[in-house]
Amino acid sequence: PKTIYLKDYQVPDYLVDSTDLHFELEPKATLVKSQLKIRRNPKAGQGLPPLLLDGIDLELLSIAIDGSILPEVSYQETLQGLSILVDKPEFILEIHNRINPEDNTSLEGLYLSNGMYCTQCEAEGFRKITFYPDRPDVMSKFTTTIVAPKDHPVLLSNGNQIDFGDCEDGRHFATWEDPFAKPSYLFALVAGDLENVEDTFTTSSGREVKLQIFTEAKNIGKCEHAMRSLKKAMSWDEEVYGREYDLDIFMIVAVDHFNMGAMENKGLNIFNSACVLASPETATDSAFQRIESIVGHEYFHNWSGNRVTCRDWFQLSLKEGFTVFRDAEFSADMNSRAVKRIEDVSLLRTNQFAEDAGPMSHPIRPDSYIEISNFYTLTVYEKGAEVVRMLHTLLGKEKFRKGSDLYFERHDGSAATCEDFILSMEDANQVNLTQFRHWYSQAGTPILEVTDSFDQATGRYSLKVSQSCPTRANQDKSLPLHIPIKIGLLDVDGNNSILNNEGDIEEVLEVTQPEQLFEFSGFREKPLPSLLRDFSAPVKVRYPYTGKQLIFLMRNDSDTFNRWDASQRLAFMALTQLQQDYRSGEALQLQPELIEAYRDVLKDSTLDPALVAEILRLPSEQSVAEMNDLIDAEAIVVARDFALKTLATALAPELLQRYTALDHQKPYSPNAKDIAERSLKNTCLSYLAATEKDDALNIVQKQFETAGNMTDSAAALSALINYGSAPKVDSAIQEFYQRWKDDTQVVELWLGLQSSSARNGTLANIKNLIKHPSFEIKNPNKVRAVLGGFANRNFKQFHKEDGSGFFFIAEQVVMLDKINPQIAARLVVPITRWQKYSDDLSGKMREALQGILDSGGLSKDVFEVVSKSIN
Ligand code: DPP
Ligand code: ZN
């Protein structure tokens, strides 16, 4: 397979002023007729080179230019598409081709999901629909006519419906016109037997927009939360960014078979059902929150993605990093800001840091790729969002807004680059971001070593910060980055000291040098630094905190994020010690001060219960693994299990007390306060279950039997699965399935809870689950629940020393690659991080990878991920 490089970018040879599409839908033989108004790109140089069109898995029927059928000598079908000889600078190209939606299991292009036709075109799916210059910098006005049998009453595409009616042969049709020029990746089509809920939103300038959410009839009661979220997002974007919606209609369609979370197609967002459908009985709090943030995310793309799109796919973070930042701020404004930040940072540290230290490490703007689908990563999305957040921190709210206004104004209606975004920030504010740009081109997680000193005589306190970025990929060329570090300095009473003449108690230090000294004066005693408040940069900070100091920060820091962070550091310290003791054969024990610190937090009724829950929850095995230079999976599992059980036993009375106080039956509402209370209640429940005592397990059983919402029900089932006695577990699993077997979203949850069970025997159970009638290898959500749940969320069972977990996943990857390469390439990732594992496991992982490579006939997707990790 060929590698594509950013440095080779060239403007398109031809532009497409308008795109007229005509579909006649048939499951196995859909006819696509396209009429393109094509013109030589004046920016592309002299002469008339051949017109190259992308096309994959298409059956070409005919090509005509300006109404005359093209003879075979004038074009050539290639592996990637079509090459057409051109003899005039402007012409109408008409192509007819046939496609097979029913057999399209890759879920890219046009495919069927439960009998509904739908599309996914980002990044390069449009070329599976028809021949086209399928690249984001070719923007065109689309008109789409859909002809279908009447058992598919709903026919949708982008923009406004301008015509509909019956055909003579008994079918019917609809024509849609999108007034905004767009790249092909934003095209969408839906045809099915769907119902919808409808609402309206009046924009700040007084235009009324029709809002519709479409789904299969059985799910019509699950759309309310998404609709509410959409309206909140529309208001928020007006208030915070001054961005108004631009069409008269905004539609969302829920689809069960979907590779991603959702897709921002102009005016017609298509969503993975799991990211849009919810009801209190069937969806957990995290599902409710995920829906709010994804509905917001896709809506925000209307400006950051659609009105201003990306010049090429190397710029993906331009729209994704910015839009994730926007949706994170939206969620923070709607819910608990601190808890949202903690959740996002946990994800970043556990998974993005691991990606950045692994074989697929890449900058937020990659330099090259084999398959772009492999670059829809945590780095491009989440680290990309952190980079935008750093700009927000460095510039401040008002200047950031001036920069974003200028960016939208300058680039509206065009395809832009990350450089354009930075330039707008610079030009709007007369600042220099030259050094900041390295964040876009440099991979790896920077490490900041911080030391401090205090001179009693002068009252001067200094912080020395050194930065480095140790990644395989940039070993020789790592450049110092521009890093904002928000800090506070605590006095002995735990109060923030005054840091400067302006009287600030918090400051953003701008680190730009490899080593830099920051000085503060006027101290009577040495303060305790609270570093990287609010996680102001995606870096690792090392400072030699003692356990006592961390407990002090946990109790006193005014920065909520850092209170949590102190608890994490403390837990890591303890888990590291336990791992060492285990390896050297010593008796394991947990420091009494640590237990007391947890007890204090648990008993503190002044703290936000959600924060208490976050602090109590021990770092996952995966995040401990990420922190270690060499991963000893067994030691990590033993250490964490021991810490968990010890805490559970020692804190049992307080856990029970808090659990009981929070266990009130009130009607479900997914508001921040109630979510926080359920979060703490269920954290207490899972600790109690970990004692494996009968009375604790009876509480779990009772919650399972009486829960009035899915959050409580799923938490109880999870605790039972992990700690209950075998017969009770079996009957709970069966009972739950019998009750919910007709609800796809709940069944996905049910599958996921089983495959992430830490119990021995889980792999054997998974091998049965993939034969269960509810499992469907062609459905990505089911694959993610069962196989992804095992490989990504079941550290203990996946890392068995015999390698059985790796070999099983490798086998599934090879099989899945023939069905859906994108999903297969995701599933293989956990095995590719072999370099960091101790010898026994890393050898097995390599063996599993080699097996995949040797199986031959791999997709570009899987080939890229596996070959980059094994070489
Ligand atoms: N562009 C989509 C999103 O992240 C991914 N397909 O919203
Ligand atoms: Zn996105």
Image (cartoon, rainbow, N blue to C red):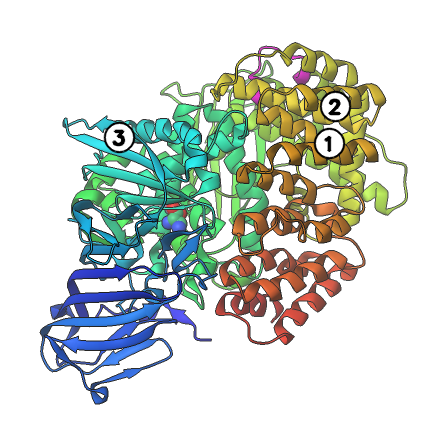
Judge whether 632 appears above or below 675 on screen.
below
Residue 536 in percent (x, y) is at: 45, 36
Judge whether 832 appears above or below 403 on screen.
below
Amino acid at the residue labelled 1: Ala
Tell me the CA gap for discs 1 and 2: 9 Å
Q: Residues within 10 Å of mark 3 (few under 14, many from 20)?
A: few
Image position of 257 (left or right of 574): left
Residue 34 in percent (x, y) is at: 21, 66
Closer to the eye: label 3 or 2:
2
Q: Splitting the image into 4 quarters, where does residue 247 fall?
A: top left
Would you say residue 460 is visible in this rendering?
Answer: no
**Relative to the observer, which residue lies in front, 270 or 455?**
270
Q: Which residue is mark 1?
A: 732
Question: Counting residues from the N terminus, which is met first, the one under dot 1 or under dot 3?
Answer: 3
Residue 668 in percent (x, y) is at: 52, 18
Q: The C terminus lies in which quarter of the figure?
A: bottom right
Question: Counting residues from the N terminus, which is met first, the one under dot 1 or under dot 2?
Answer: 2
**Relative to the observer, which residue lies in front, 509 or 849?**
849
Tell me the CA gap for discs 3 and 2: 52 Å
Image position of 348 (left or right of 428): right
Question: Counting residues from the N terminus, which is met first, the one under dot 3 or under dot 2?
Answer: 3
